Image (cartoon, rainbow, N blue to C red):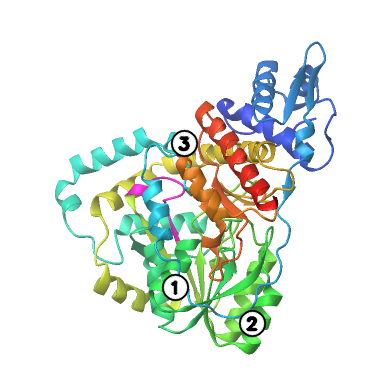
Amino acid sequence: MTVSVLTRGDSFKYDQVSRYITDLIDKGQLKPGDKAPSLRKLSKELGVSISTISQSYLSLEDQGILRAKPQSGFFINSMVNQINNIPKSASTEGQPRKVSFGGLFEEIFINASNPRMVPFGEAKPSMDFMPVKSLTRTTRSIISRFPERCMDYSFPPGNRKLREQIAQQYQNISTRVSADDVIITSGATEALSLSLQTVAKRGDIIAVESPTYFAVLRLIEKMGMLALEIETDPETGIVLDALAEAFDTMDIKAVLASPNFSNPLGCLMPEENKRALVNMLAELDVPLIEDDVYGSVYFGEKRPRAAKSYDLNNLVLSCSSFSKSLAPGYRIGWVLAGRYRKKVVELKQATFSATSSINQLAMAEFLSSGQYDRHLVRLRMNMRDQVEKGRYMIARSFPRGTCISNPQGGNVVWVEMPTGCNSLDIFNRALEKNIGVTPGILFSATRRFKNYLRINCGFPWNETNQQAMTTLGKIVSASLAESRS
């Protein structure tokens, strides 16, 4: 048998063998306790060396998916059936709310800057998985070749070459975008901010997913708008029937959602749902602000389409950046603003003005060289492996009854702890151990998800991080025991 997944370079073959095994487990063709295919048999079936299969099996053993029995081979670990996926949450109250979290936002970001903190509370891949050396070389080359351009302003809509490269990325996923459609911003947060300010004003209702990324709620708070939480399926994203019902009774000015790998769920909206969402909003003449920041960090066979690709009425403002896929510190994002392009450019000029010229030039060069596409191949494989290992470690460390999301992209997981656990209490206890986590109440304007945590898995699971997860599990268990006593 010839397997199509083994088409990359030799250096990635063991990762793809690992994926082949985990896919068999996911499909139920290999069950807990079953013996894994022998090294010799799988080597023959997949057309790769025995040493490659062995390397893959050792990696799967390290992740807790396989266990070795002396003289008997490898077996599927019983742990694989102990991960409970996040269930569908109860319906939201359906009322728009003011957002207010006081200083908790600031504390989260302060802790993220602490180098001693174990980074479970962050939402970005580790620099270990980023092309630090090659991007640095590119940046130095740009400074050497174009010193004056690097030091000068780059006014909106931004560097032409970079916009052309970003447009090309969209054309690769069946989305018609030209360089003129792209407006460069200082990260995705600025893109979202500009989009919200363009389509809504103080007091307006913005429909959001539930849970939704807390930075979105913070933007809504600072702009004096109201957040309306819409029921969201942990696998398929925002529930369209619930959104339609909300439109029947409320004057919603915009919808802000992440069809591709929402933060914190990591869910992926099916393509037919994306099309239906865009068409629904087109009929109502309501803009969709799409947060597609994780779109390139997918675990499947191909990059899912952006909701923007179904936009025939120029009502979708699609926002993204390189922060989750390449260089968060470069602060390069963009927005495809559709019919709102002129307003977004004017607002950008009036508020944030220019975006870093050096970083735009370096990004344009890095993308045009093909290095970015090659990096993404490695990053996606690494994030899938790290997230999968993280899920098993959480299941092993947390108390019975814990449920864990099964993201289809990105680098974070959403963890539902047993009833009685208080995520804010666990957050504070973890800080005392230099462990950062993000409490679930931050992801809801109504402060739902009190027994939830968002946990970052986008880093190497070295001994320190593994021990920290064990410690975090003990903290959760202790908190649960106290609540029940």
In the rendered image, residue 327 lying in the magenta stretch gets the answer yes
Indicate left or right for 264 with 42 as reference: left
Q: Residue 202 placed where, x, y %? A: 40, 83
Name the residue beneath numbered marker 2. Answer: 246
Mark 2 surroundings: few (<14), some (14-19) or many (≥20) residues within 10 A:
some
- Label 3, label 1: how far apart the Cα atoms are: 32 Å
Indicate left or right for 207 with 113 as reference: right
State whether residue 103 is above or below residue 392: below
In the rendered image, residue 333 lying in the magenta stretch gets the answer no
**C-beta proximity under 8 Å, tags 1 and 2:** no
**C-beta proximity under 8 Å, tags 3 and 1:** no
State whether residue 199 is above or below residue 381: below
Q: Residue 230 placed where, x, y %? A: 62, 73
Which of the marked residues, 3 or 2, is nearer the chain's N terminus?
Answer: 3
Q: Secondary structure at mark 1?
A: helix
Name the residue beneath numbered marker 1. Answer: 220
